[in-house]
Image: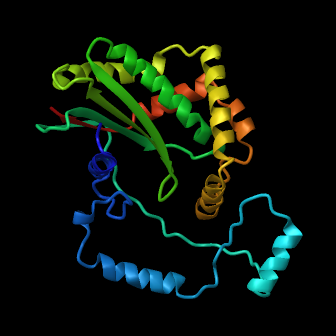
Amino acid sequence: PASLEKILGRISTLRSLLHPGFTAAPWKKPGALSALTQEKAERYFEARFSRVNDGMLILSGDLDEATVRKALQKYIGGFRTLKGGVSRKPVTYRSLSGTTTYTQEGDDKSVTVLMETEYPLTAVNYVAAPFVEEALRRSLVRALDGTGLTVTVRSGFTAQPQERFSLLVTCRPYREEACDLLAALPKIRSGIRSAVTAPLTDADVKAWQNAEQQRVAASLSNPETIVSQVLGRYAIGKDLVSKYTESIAAVDAGRVRQILEKTTGGGCVEYVIY
């Protein structure tokens, strides 16, 4: 299996190809940074964070409010909390539309497909992402039956500078000699197209809802998850999990198909290593 470093490197490459004009991407490779990057970063952090007047303290656990307040007064002293905001300059960049394919010879034999589109990041769409992953994965498994390829599907939202949704498909040979990757590429494309029209039953959706309810409930028992969600709420101004039960119940087959149709019809980069 590919190492995490290779996977992240591949994602970085694909996103750079899909967004050639976006120089501030968080997935930029270190080698592509300019000589002035460190100087610019130091000026930014000095201007933005040199004064400790906009911090946020997050406490997670079974804590009594009165006890916590008393402890904070004792060890930190009196402090005021004020409403504040951060203004962000709009960032525009060009994203490719249609499908672009790259091929190269190499040892890490695989087909990686990144699809991405503008899509609103709402609480319901956020919890629908695993449903979309599973619908696409099932369609690809059917299309690639007998080819000797394994399939993984990952999804993700970005909130800044644009709200976008992406699907990342990775297909690898079960055994190195098992599959002609270039010959399998049309079947991968067929599996992606078929996912939009493949039937989704009420039983499918109900099973996915139950699985997602259990997954989110388990994750929220971890204090680190709670802290990360609070930080995310502060950073992007969205509460994505507080009413997760209602959000998951709102996901239906129509929403899954809509997200699939929009994403598979957006920008797409195929990267084949054979």
Above or below, comparing residue 114 to residue 202 in the picture = below
In the rendered image, residue 213, in percent from the top left (x then y), is placed at 68, 33
- In the shown orientation, is residue 138 left or right of residue 10? right
In the rendered image, residue 232, in percent from the top left (x then y), is placed at 60, 58
- In the shown orientation, is residue 233 left or right of residue 147? right
Above or below, comparing residue 231 to residue 17 in the picture = below
- How many marks the image carries: the answer is 0
In the rendered image, residue 152, in percent from the top left (x then y), is placed at 39, 31
Task: State the residue at coordinates (66%, 21%).
Answer: 206
Colouring chosen for the image of the structure: rainbow
Q: Residue furthest left?
A: 105
Task: State the residue at coordinates (27%, 23%).
Answer: 174
Above or below, comparing residue 79 to residue 150 in the picture = below
Task: State the residue at coordinates (33%, 19%).
Answer: 190
Q: Quadrant of the N terminus?
A: top left
In the rendered image, residue 118, in percent from the top left (x then y), is placed at 47, 45
Camera sees residue 79? no
Camera sees residue 274? yes
